[in-house]
Amino acid sequence: MAQKKYTKLKLKKFKKAIEEKMSDINGEMNGIRDRLENTAKGNASLAQDSVYSVHMADAGTDSYEREKSFHLMNRETDYFHHLQLALERIDADEFGACMVCGELIPEERMMEVLNATKCVDCKEKEKLNLS
């Protein structure tokens, strides 16, 4: 059975959407990096004796915000990588086909989840451990 594929025009549309999303992610990651650098500079500039004047709750909040930023950065980096893989699938003419059943993933799903590799049915089976 021949693998089902999207037309060149639709692949071009997907590629443009992926590239736009990657550009957005780059901007978000730059913002996160800036926040992390500013937070680190602020804490590093405190003199040792002034550290005790910082309230413990404030220090805890700062620590929580830094940790949250690191998690966001990791998440965005992972998503960016998955989008790069999607671009590679477009170049290899493998984009949009379910990796499990081989059926063409609906365009609506592909536009919502640009890095999708499974159709909704196969993804649901995977989540329910039915595959």
Image: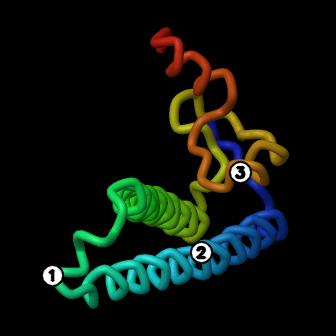
- Give the class, few, some or many, for how many residues have Cα within 10 Å of label 2's Cα (few <14, many ≥20): some
Q: SS at mark 1?
A: helix
In the image, what residue occupies the spot 67% across and 76% down?
24
Residue for badge 3: 5
Residue for badge 2: 28
Q: Nearer the viewer, residue 27 or 57?
A: 57
Q: Within the image, what quadrant is residue 49 found in?
A: bottom left
At which x and y percent is residue 122? 59, 24
Q: SS at mark 2?
A: helix
Q: Which label's residue is closer to the chain start, 1 or 2?
A: 2
In the image, what residue occupies the spot 30% across and 72% down?
53
Q: Is residue 7 left or right of residue 93?
A: right
In the image, what residue occupies the spot 84% across and 69% down?
9
Q: Which mark is residue 73?
A: none
Residue 27 visible somewhere in the drawing: yes
Q: Which label's residue is closer to the chain start, 3 or 2?
A: 3
